Image: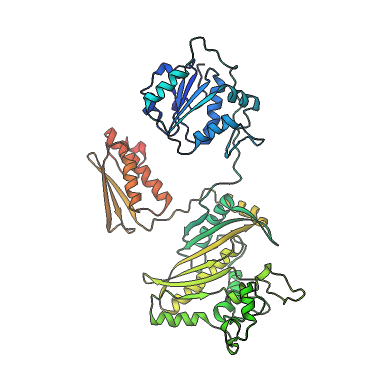
Amino acid sequence: MKQWPLYYKDFLTVSNPKCNVGVCTLWTPKDKLTNQLDKKSFSLAGQLYSKRGINFILRNVLANPYINRIVLCGADRSESGEALIKFVKKGIDKKYRVIGDKKCEIQRELNKEAIEDFRKNVEVIDMRGEVDTKKISKVIRGKVAGRNLKPWAKPRKFKETEFHAADKFPSEKTAFNIRAGFVWEAWIQILRLIMKFGSKKGMIKIGEVKELVNVITVIEKEDPYDPELPGIFNFGKRDLKLYYKDFFDSSKGTESYNYGERMFAYPAGVPVGDFNSSKNQRTANTSTPLGIDSKLTKVVGGLDQLEEIYEKYKRYHEDRGLVVAIWNPWIDNVKEGWMAEEGGKGKAERAGNVPCMALLQFTYRSKKMHLTAYFRSNDMFDAWPRNAFALRKLQYDFAKRVGKSAGYLTTISNCGQIYENNYEKAIEIIEKFKDRTFCMGDPRGTVIIEVKGNEIIVRHMSPDGNTQLGEYKINGRAEKASLKLMDELIINDVFSKDYHIADIATELSKAEWCVKNGVNFIQDRDCSELI
């Protein structure tokens, strides 16, 4: 009993180990309730933030089976209390999941016999939401057993659960943002994200892929004429030159399409009479298909879209319509691409492919020419690096033509995948750079922290450090001063990067500690240097 409780002893209030009542305050701070309870009336008290914590309630109670009542009170913000009630009422299934709550799993090291003993002998009194200590005390008094209390079983301990890396990790599901100076730096971060958070999908004719939705990547410094190639790609400078030639070739040859054709010789939309939509099929059978004059169904040589947006730019530099359409709905929607049937009775031969890149948009802002590319689908291992270099070249060339410098290249890969046959290679590259953080300066600025007397002062400065953008203050002796000041900075959108938030949060915590301990604070100094 001296070693009890076995788990989270420092976070629990241990009172009378041989009492039969335990108190679980869920998300409500236990001290706010237990400080007003009779210490002899309960064995121990603690909180239950997560459903996983149910395992440690089981382990602690089974190690001290005097407890046969658990009073459940306080705020149930994560439904951990609900899961505990379901566990006691319904038990677990074959996969050790609580019946009625698939997200709550009981550790397999706890054998089913012990689990059932707990369910039979321990009553959970549901007072969720209650924080009135008088009402809680009254219930506890009614549940406390007399002096002749006996344990309902022999004390039991169980093996520790071995940690196994998860196969699947929760994530934000869409909009994964990456910012880097060079293509290779961004690529490694892309591989990390997809291999860790990507959902496994089965694709027709391809097999399994890991995929993320909306991988948004910004490249800031890459020079396509002198690219940074650190030896991790399966191509070199000579290969890139050949890729550029194909990428910008306006003749598709025998292929279904190429990007050069769509940019420099965009094909006219031609009603093909074999639509997916029954409405379009009916309209196509009229004398004037979809209202298009049959004399205008061809454009000799195709449309050079770059010439058109160049003329737009000359008329108005900040035109929001400097858009190059790669996707051709007459071909790419109607013919369905490679997923369509290839020929057959009563059906025409269909296209063998459709473009992955669907749209480009040039934007002139802050005296620089930026480029955004939208991909409906993107092979992020093999295709994305080459695509990025080629797009950067397109951006450089167009910027030079209009007498400006290239700004940011942004790619939006709606379905960003890594194919199964590249999993092993991706993991090797990730492992090679496992300690690399790829930190960049925050484009929203820098933060200077200073302590004057008891006051913590934060100055938000421009990225070059020359202009003060904002100022925030707090008394460093206030309760949770650094947290309150950090909340104010976040509310005012001072940060754009997680690691910047982490750095400043650490510095503010140090500043608060220094104020409360009478130590001189200097930003970015190690704690040992301050003492």
x and y percent of residue 409 in the render?
Answer: 47, 66
Q: Is residue 523 above or below residue 200?
A: above
Q: Residue at x 56, y 69 (%)?
A: 357
User: Does the rendering let one see residue 523?
Assistant: no
User: Count of labels shown?
Assistant: 0
> Is residue 216 visible to us here?
yes
Position of 41 compared to 270: left or right? left
Q: Residue at x 53, y 31 (%)?
A: 85
In the rendering, at what x and y percent does residue 466 appear? 28, 59
Relative to 283, residue 93 above or below: above
**In the image, is residue 453 above or below residue 44?**
below
Please provide percent x and percent y for residue 248. Answer: 57, 76
Q: Quadrant of the C terminus?
A: top left
194 or 396, nearer to the observer: 194
Seen at 37% across and 44% down, the residue is 505
Describe residue 461's horizontal placement relative to residue 98 as left or right: left
Colour mode? rainbow
Give the residue at the far bottom of this rendering.
295
Say whether residue 444 is left or right of residue 98: left
Instruction: State the residue in front, 71 or 161.
Output: 71
The residue furthest right is: 345
Residue lying farthest top? 148
- Position of 292 relative to 456 (above/below): below
Q: Horizontal and vertical percent for residue 138?
A: 41, 21
Q: Quadrant of residue 380?
A: bottom right
